[in-house]
Amino acid sequence: MSAWVQTLKELSEASGVPGQEQEVRELMRSYLQPFTDEVRTDNLGSIVGRKTGKAGGPKIMLMGHMDEVGFMVTRVTKKGFIVFQTLGGWLPHVLLAQRVMIQTRKGSIIGVIGSKPPHVSSQSDRAKVTEITDMYIDIGADNEEHAKELGVRPGDAIVPICPFTVMANERMYMGKAFDNRGGCLTAVELLRRLHGADHPNIVFAGATVQEEVGLRGARTSATMIEPDIFIALETGMALDTPGLDDSPHLPEIKCGGGPAIALYDHSLVPNPKLRDLLFDTAEEAGIPCQYGAAPGTSTDGGAAHLVASGIPSITIAIPARYIHSHAAILHHDDVEYTVNLLAAVVKKLDQKMVDWIKS
């Protein structure tokens, strides 16, 4: 297993639902420190490493986000079952019978998401998707007091369970939280690639908090750094699975096809000169890339580009299948392509180029 695949494994298996990203943050701190002059955090917990290529050069900020979609304990029933709140976007289709881990003050507890059995449901109810509000988590507690003795209380984080797996096709990886630990990995590997290399700017790279619940850490961290350029490092939807790959209304985004450059999302219409710089650099360097519009999603670029008087911003994403579920899949080559492209772009972002992008 290569060094960066080991890093992805550690990031994927770490726990970090929105607002409780501390385990991921400490991993990121350990990864960022060897390649940066300074590591800072904002008051929400986003973490940023600074690498100076040219003192006084433009500030280029590239950020993944640490948080993963998860859940929070809201109540314990008299029979000891856990009522929960989603943190981030979940479809109910992917939840039933999935294992989860509740992080309590006394340690972690394993549970399973359950609902009323179909065997005692009416025929019409069986045909419906079970609402999340009709689900609960079973930790095997005897009653409410027993669950409390085990340490469970409202506010505890609940994290999906999925061990990181190298698949039979050894260039494909499966794990939880690739959205957006893939972006965290990209930030780390970009700094590793730039270590000892010349670049005409000051690079700030790291990861934000609370992206999945409103792009919150992007706003505070961009306010702290005040960058000239902001690039959101995402893990986005691959659209190469049955029922999607032949749709004329969807972009062709496949695993192994290179990073996807966002043309539009609900929160951001990217700076067109920055967009063209990414496309032109990829073409010049022979790096495969893809593009797409996702009107139903929002990214950290959407918050960052509105900071102060405005920051030219764009989102670039590693394609992954089944994001916002317990188990996602991504392709080794897409990480390599993404880091290669970003390293080439960063080296072009001197003061003259940044002034042109802003003009």
Image: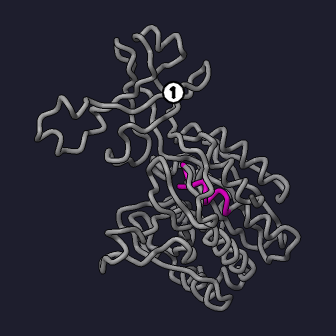
Q: Which residues are magenta?
A: 176-186
Q: Quadrant of residue 311?
A: bottom right
Residue type at numbered disc 1: Asp
Which residue is drawn at the image coordinates 70% and 46% (left, top)? 41
209 in magenta: no
Q: Quadrant of residue 48?
A: bottom right
Residue at label 1? 156
Judge whether residue 222 can be spotted in this image: no
Which residue is drawn at the image coordinates 58% and 41% (left, top)? 16
Which residue is drawn at the image coordinates 79% and 47% (left, top)? 30
- Residue 114: % across, % down: 34, 31
Q: Is residue 324 above or below residue 95?
A: below
- Residue 82: % across, % down: 40, 23
Residue 315 vs residue 223, the one in the foreground: 315
- Residue 64: % across, % down: 61, 58
Judge whether residue 341 can be spotted in this image: yes
Residue 92 vs residue 44, the one in the foreground: 92
